[in-house]
Image (cartoon, rainbow, N blue to C red):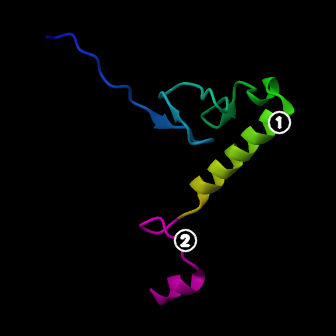
Amino acid sequence: MHIFIKPAVLTNCKKCGKPVMPHTICRYCGYYKDREFIDVLGKLSKKEKKLREREMKTAQKEQKTPTRAGGQKPLTMEELSKK
């Protein structure tokens, strides 16, 4: 009874947001700690490369955009001054 399997612990990649094992290079974008180690896009065709770049850009925009509780749009300056 002392032998058991632990569930995998995953974190999100800072660059693309995909789940990744801790302390490993992301297989989707090739980045680790904000540095590119593997040129993942170099091995893809032109169509796949464009699609992957679009997905990575949208994932970065979603991560950088601060939102209110409940996933609503970010507060404007007017709304902030009212509070």
* Residue 6: x %, y % from top left: 29, 21
Q: Is residue 75 magenta?
A: yes
Q: On screen, 20 above or below 50?
A: above
Q: On screen, 79 above or below 51?
A: below
Amino acid at the residue labelled 1: Lys
> Dot 2: within a 10 Å radius of its alpha carbon, few (fewer than 14), some, or many (20 or more) residues?
few
Q: Residue at x 76, y 26 (%)?
A: 39
Question: Which residue ends up furthest to the front in the rendered image?
Answer: 47
* Residue 68: x %, y % from top left: 47, 69
For residue 45, what is the image quadrant? top right
The magenta-colored residue range is 67-83
Amino acid at the residue labelled 2: Lys
Front label number (1 vs 2): 1
Magenta segment main secondary structure: loop
Is the N terminus in the top left, top right, bottom left or bottom right quadrant?
top left
Secondary structure under badge 2? loop
> Dot 1: within a 10 Å radius of its alpha carbon, few (fewer than 14), some, or many (20 or more) residues?
few
Q: On screen, 3 above or below 19?
A: above
Q: Residue at x 43, y 32 (%)?
A: 10
Name the residue that disc number 2 marks. 73
Q: Give the mark nearest the N terminus, 1 or 2.
A: 1
* Residue 58: x %, y % from top left: 67, 51
For residue 74, what is the image quadrant? bottom right
Is the C terminus in the top left, top right, bottom left or bottom right quadrant?
bottom left
Question: Which residue ends up furthest to the left in the rendered image?
Answer: 1
Name the residue that disc number 1 marks. 47
